[in-house]
């Protein structure tokens, strides 16, 4: 105890801590969307649109109260921060005074392509929040003086931090699907979405980042929300053996394979960097394929824990957090928490697979050892 206090006094700034793995990173900086948002959406959206995830039962399993996370408890980055001895990441827009251990820029609804594009091309019938990947990079830039001072000091600090860029893409593709576009048209956006993600990773590396985790897309075609919204359409022939929507999952897989290829090209360009592809697709499919071994009853596999009735327990007039919705007794017996986002148990399983394998290339703990 005294010894670690001495060490923390000696290494006040961005230095690798003591040799133990649990102190490997001095901070974490994360960009992304609602899968890892820890409160940013509530800050920017609550004054403009109705928000439900700032109400119970969000946070019922961990924290004990809503935190702005879209889950019953912790999300992937919480488990990863915990593994490295870092505190849960604060939402950047809450202006927390101490950002030395990192901050989370992720915000629900964020896209990889700037929102101006969706507005200009009339792909969305509403005014989107200005929270895309580039906007988040701008927030990071603005916060930099509170994180580090000189150019070299910042490079040094970034080199000892763990970065997350993503998941991005799900909201882009949702916008385009919702505009009534065909699968082929949605597919045609994948290169640009991937390119924006890769440019962001590259920008961080150019600013000194060495460790960057880039999560791919989850199987959004298995989302109880999307399954419900699409059930009024004639989807004959579009369900796979798991009951998920094949066209949506094909886009997710195409995105993931393009992203992996682009990451592998980036590794060639920046051999000193450790760029990790984090698979967000396979861990979920592996639960859906074998639910009983995860404690999920087969009839609940595509049903949300927190919802307001219906085949998938997702009801647009009673979404989780609204008066008509209720939560299941044991969220860990469900994959989906609210129809789009996952339960803490699902996130924990994914985080383990990203840290130790098999769901990351390379697993984070292997990337730090070579
Ligand atoms: C955070 O700081 C910004 C810039 O100073 C300010 O506009 C915003 O209202 C603050 N947000 C909160 C939640 O205090
Ligand atoms: C979003 O924010 C960025 C950076 O602050 C700005 O350049 C852009 O014009 C904004 N876009 C919209 C649609 O408000
Ligand atoms: C940067 O320098 C200023 C002025 O010396 C100081 O007030 C501030 O705390 C420094 N910031 C960091 C992150 O070290
Ligand atoms: C639904 O689509 C299938 C295949 O495209 C078609 O054979 C069937 O007639 C359609 N059913 C309705 C009710 O439109
Ligand atoms: C959806 O929620 C509304 C409002 O609570 C309720 O009236 C309706 O019966 C629900 N639908 C289903 C299918 O449970």
Image (cartoon, grey):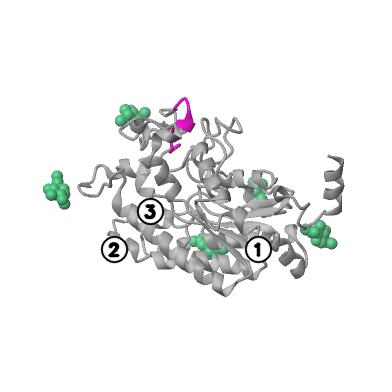
Q: Which residues are magenta?
A: 328-337
Marker disc for residue 141: 1
Tag 2–tag 3 contact (CB < 8 Å):
no
Q: Earlier in the sequence, mark 2 or mark 1?
A: 1
Residue 150 position within the rendered picture, expressed as x and y whole percent measured from the top left: 77, 68
Tag 3–tag 1 contact (CB < 8 Å):
no
Residue in the foreground of this view, choosing between 152 and 11: 11
Element type at mark 2: helix
> Residue at (30%, 63%) from the top-left corner?
185
Residue behind mark 3 = 174
Residue in the foreground of this view, choosing between 24 and 35: 24
Is label 1 within 8 A of ligand 2 (CB to nearest ligand atom)? Answer: no
* Number of residues whose C-alpha sits closer than 10 Å to that of mark 1, classed few (under 14), some (14–19) or many (20 or more): few
Q: Main secondary structure of the magenta part?
A: loop
Mark 3 to mark 1 CA distance (whole Å)? 28 Å
Q: Earlier in the sequence, mark 2 or mark 3?
A: 3
Residue behind mark 2 = 184
Mark 2 to mark 3 CA distance (whole Å)? 14 Å
Residue in the foreground of this view, choosing between 27 and 324: 27
């Amino acid at each position: 105890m005294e010894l670690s206090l001495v060490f923390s006094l000696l290494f006040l700034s961005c230095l690798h801590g003591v040799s133990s793995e649990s102190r490997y990173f001095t901070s974490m900086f994360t960009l992304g969307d609602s899968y890892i948002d820890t409160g940013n959406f509530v800050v920017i959206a609550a004054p403009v649109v109705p928000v439900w995830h700032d109400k119970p039962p969000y946070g019922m399993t961990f924290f004990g109260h809503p935190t702005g996370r879209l889950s019953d408890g912790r999300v992937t980055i919480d488990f990863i921060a915990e593994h490295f001895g870092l505190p849960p990441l604060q939402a950047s827009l809450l202006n927390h005074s101490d950002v030395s251990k990192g901050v989370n820029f992720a915000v629900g609804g964020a896209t990889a392509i700037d929102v101006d594009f969706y507005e200009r091309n009339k792909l969305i019938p509403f005014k989107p929040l200005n929270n895309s990947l580039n906007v988040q990079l701008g927030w990071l830039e603005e916060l930099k003086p509170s994180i580090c001072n000189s150019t070299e000091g910042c490079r040094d600090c970034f080199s000892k931090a763990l970065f997350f860029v993503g998941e991005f893409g799900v909201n882009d593709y949702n916008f385009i699907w919702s505009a009534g576009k065909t699968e082929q048209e949605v597919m045609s956006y994948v290169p640009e979405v991937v390119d924006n993600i890769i440019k962001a990773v590259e920008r961080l590396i150019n600013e000194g980042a060495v460790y960057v985790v880039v999560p791919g897309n989850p199987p959004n075609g298995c989302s109880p929300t999307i399954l419900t919204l699409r059930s009024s359409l004639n989807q004959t022939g579009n369900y796979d053996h798991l009951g998920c929507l094949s066209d949506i999952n094909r886009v997710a897989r195409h995105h993931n394979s393009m992203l992996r290829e682009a990451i592998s090209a980036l590794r060639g360009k920046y051999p000193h960097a450790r760029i990790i592809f984090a698979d967000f697709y396979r861990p979920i499919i592996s639960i859906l394929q074998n639910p009983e071994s995860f404690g999920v009853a087969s009839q609940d596999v595509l049903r949300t824990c927190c919802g307001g009735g219906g085949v998938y327990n997702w009801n647009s007039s009673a979404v989780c957090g609204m008066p008509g919705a209720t939560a299941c007794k044991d969220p860990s017996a469900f994959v989906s928490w609210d129809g789009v986002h996952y339960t803490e148990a699902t996130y924990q399983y994914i985080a383990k697979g990203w840290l130790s394998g098999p769901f990351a290339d390379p697993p984070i703990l292997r990337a730090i050892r070579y």
